[in-house]
Amino acid sequence: MNPADVQEDLRRLLEEENIGYLCTSDSSGTPHIAPMFFYYSFDTHELFFISDRKTRKVSNLLEVNSLAFTVDIRDRENPFNNRGVLLRGELVKLTDLSMELSEKSRGALRLFSEKYQGFIDAKIPGESLIQVVEKGESAFIRSFQDVLVTVSIYKITYWKGPFSVVFDPEKIITPP
Amino acid sequence: MKKQLWFYEKLYGRLPFLSKAEPTEATILILLLFEMIALGFVALIEVPLVAILLGTLMIFMLALWTEVASFIAPNIRDVSLPRNKEERRIMKRYKELLFSEDNVELVIALVIFMGLIAYYVSTDWHYFIFWIGKPTYVILLFGLFISWEVSYRVALSLWTALLAAWRSLSLLMISRRTKVPSTRYFPYKDIQRLERLDRLNLSFALIAVPLYLASLADPFLNAVVLIYIAALFLLYAVSAVSLKFLKTLPRNINSLLSRADIGMLGLYDPEKKAPHLTPVAFTHDPFNIYIVTSVVSKKIKIIKNNPRACFLADLKDERGLLRQEAVLIKGNAKVLDFLESVRIGFKMLRIRRMFRDKYPQYVEMYQKEENRVPLAWQLKPFISRLVVKISIDSMTYWDKSRKIWIKL
């Protein structure tokens, strides 16, 4: 497969697919999988998702900080068209959404809510998450359990049918 | 907890020469003891040859019965309890009733025995006279003793079968009620063992054939024996059918696993201290998920170091992002290599057929493209492809994830 096609398909998978699968593990080595909404930043090679702090995935990440994240497209008829990407990364931080957010977190949250417009909303009557984010600091007052999870990605595996390639996220060519 | 015993186990446990013997040895000892007493009578008084043969047959039957019972009892005591609350309650109650302190089987035996005596008396011991001519007190006593032994075993087998039928039916009813386990659900894996024990209990009916022959002379007793055998078969059938239906996953989970083409297999690599996650083709039966992978895949390497596995199958609904249906399974993975496949034999062939049935288009494509694909993808069992079995420990099912509200 030619490298430009791989790059293009990889970008499409991470930008356009809505659901990815997160695999974490507890300290005893028992894995856990969860389907997730996600946002991948090609600028910083960071993966973002939002979760309740009390979930298994977050408690697992606090025990074992590495994770695997897979986004794939399936073809019922032809296995040669099955393709996907496996991201491997490490937890950078958990950002409590009830606290005042940094400019960076707010930026990630904005991009995240743009991707899932209509599916994710702030629980404030009559306002979308984007509106709340845009309003800035004053909106983040009530204390709840939600956290924004930031993960740095150190290795990417792309496959299509029997073909697969592993590379460093820094090698992804960002188009001008 | 105090070990719960059947009455005869307690009794035998107290006899000095039996208490230390292995169950089978104890059975043989009892067999010899009974036979010696019987032959002693024969030496003392004149008994028709038919009666001697019949008596010997009955003693053998009793011994065989004891042997079966002594195998069933510890096995039922060892059956594991299910992890789901309701199922657990049923199995606990089942064991309690079966090995109750009140020895219910003894009460039933006494009722049957009293009935027998009442019948003997009301017919002027006609049955005894038919076999041994004019009975003496000694031989009458021995006849009654044998009658009691038979009554006890009939009672025990009926009680066991009745409880088994009740247990299986209750388990089935519970499983029908819990269609959508929204919390963790544990499949009950000791069902195969229960089935085996039920079959063993049925062998009481087969051993009762001499009883049938011995009662041919008396239409009433003959009918009672036939009813007994029929009752055992009926109760067995109720239990067996219930267990057969119980050996399925909850309907919605089964349907989801059948419809989903691809599942996600999550593992944890203890060497690299990192989780691993890949889409896999899979098939399933009520207790396991099977996946096929390449011999050289990372999955195989990880599973050999850490068998803990997580498996997720989901269906994305075209009508919307939030209409997802999914099941999350946790369990242990095992690579079915060549030796393991030989061990499980035909089951392996069945697993491979399940794959061919579920993915006919994949198999066809692989065969057509055989020359183009790398060896790891060629359909060569054991050389390039291996089956991995994930035994299901627990399942969580969910339908239609809700819209995500970020509680700002």
Image (cartoon, helix red, strand yellow):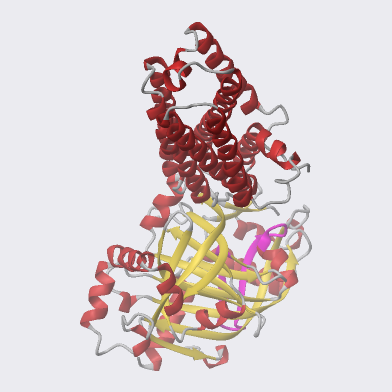
Taking the spot 47% from the left edge, 60% from the top edge, the residue there is B288
In this view, the residue in front, B349 or B211, is B211
Where residue A53 appears, as percent x and y from the top left, is: 72, 60
Q: Quadrant of the N terminus of chain A?
A: bottom left
Left or right of A63? Residue B327 is left
Residue A63: image quadrant is bottom right
Name the magenta segment's main secondary structure: strand
Q: Indicate whether B325 appears above or below B202.
A: below
Taking the spot 65% from the left edge, 53% from the top edge, the residue there is B22
Where residue B297 appears, as percent x and y from the top left, is: 47, 84
Taking the spot 45% from the left edge, 53% from the top edge, the residue there is B286
In this view, the residue in front, A146 or A67, is A67
Q: How many marks?
A: 0
Q: In this rendering, does residue B79 appear at all?
A: no
Q: Which residues are magenta?
A: A33-56
Left or right of B167? Residue B240 is left
Residue B258: image quadrant is bottom left
Q: Is residue A48 magenta?
A: yes
Left or right of A169? Residue A163 is left
In this view, the residue in front, B322 or B161, is B161
Q: Is residue B183 magenta?
A: no
Where residue B34 appears, as percent x and y from the top left, is: 58, 37
Q: Indicate whether B159 appears above or below B354.
A: above
Q: Indicate whether A140 appears above or below B241.
A: below
Taking the spot 53% from the left edge, 35% from the top edge, the residue there is B164
